[in-house]
Image (spheres, helix red, strand yellow):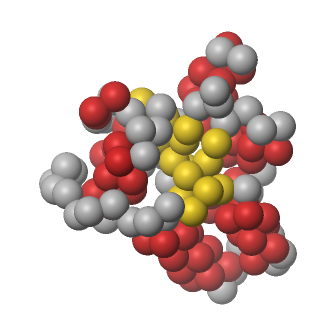
Amino acid sequence: MKPKAVIDTSVVVSAIGWRGEARGVFRLLISRSFDSIRSPYLTLEWAETLARLASQPGWENRNWQSWLEWFKSKSRLVNDPPAKMIVRRDLKDNPVLALAIGQRARFLVTFDKDLLTLEKPYGVQCLPPRSFIRAILSNP
């Protein structure tokens, strides 16, 4: 069974907007190495953040909407989980972490330091893209 992962907005934005390690997460999704999970809340956060950033000077990917639609089509949509107070420092992290926990995801892929410092809350490994890619490739 393929591992499930929730991909945080920071990684989606980085993968779509710039070349770098976050693009490797998309490559793994293309090869169907893991199952990506999303919720309405997380999907809206991706879209709003990308739209805001794409309107600013220096944004590299003018075709970001197509990239986002592709990523959404490859990520299974599930209902938003019940609200839970897990992370106190940044309340916007709670729905993302609750999604990962509620869906029994093995990974939460993020650049967010508040989430990364949690390490493995409720069995969900919070990893930056490079570590996630290594974990997936070492466990086929």
* Residue in front for this viewpoint, 138 or 80: 80
Q: Position of residue 138 (x, y in %)?
A: 67, 14
Q: Which quadrant of the figure has residue 123?
A: top left
Q: Position of residue 112 (x, y in %)?
A: 41, 48
139 displayed left or right of 46: right
Q: Position of residue 57 (x, y in %)?
A: 69, 80
Any part of residue 64 in sight? no
Q: Is residue 56 above or below residue 3?
A: below
Assign the N terminus to one quadrant of the image: top right
* Residue in front for this viewpoint, 15 or 7: 7
Kindly identify the residue that appears in the image at 67 percent across and 79 percent down: 54
Q: Residue furthest bottom?
A: 55
Q: Is residue 76 above or below residue 102?
A: below
* Residue in front for this viewpoint, 114 or 37: 37
Any part of residue 136 in sight? yes
Kindly identify the residue that appears in the image at 65 percent across and 15 percent down: 139
12 displayed left or right of 113: right
